[in-house]
Image (cartoon, grey):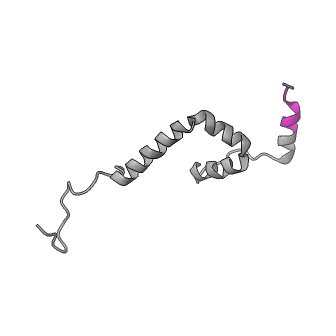
Amino acid sequence: MAFKKGAARPANSGRKKGTPNKATASVRAALEEAFEQLGGVETLAQWAEDNPGEFFKLWVKILPRDVNVEQRLTLEDLVCKAYSRPAE
């Protein structure tokens, strides 16, 4: 039965909201498997330590864009906190 122009769509047509399509789900599963085979979180942490610039480029892409900051820090605040930490 063909869809008629101007007719309402059936309520049960298509995927439910938020359900990924099959291609997206299979690519995600493959990436998760590769991540685990490459060493998982431990290897990612080591890579991040060795490549902090690249890690933070990725990190900022997944942070929420509308973060509200309630307190602004000055350079003086940051320097004072750095020197007031106990030595390890």
Q: Which residue is painted at 20% across and 56% down in the image?
A: 11
Q: Which residues are magenta?
A: 80-86
Question: Is residue 67 or residue 55 the one in the foreground?
Answer: 55
Query: Which quadrant of the rendered structure holds the N terminus?
Result: bottom left
> Would you say residue 64 is visible in this rendering?
no
Q: Which residue is painted at 87% across and 31% down in the image?
A: 84
Depicted 8 relative to depicted 17: above or below: below
Where is residue 55? Give x, y as percent: 66, 47
In this rendering, position of residue 46 left or right of residue 19: right
Q: Which residue is painted at 37% across and 54% down in the image?
A: 23
Q: In which quarter of the view is residue 85 placed?
A: top right
Question: Is residue 10 or residue 28 the one in the foreground?
Answer: 28
Where is residue 63? Give x, y as percent: 59, 48
In this rendering, position of residue 32 left or right of residue 38: left
Question: Is residue 20 or residue 86 the one in the foreground?
Answer: 20
Question: Is residue 48 or residue 37 the one in the foreground?
Answer: 37
> Would you say residue 15 is visible in this rendering?
yes
Where is residue 17? Give x, y as percent: 33, 52
Depicted 33 relative to depicted 64: above or below: above
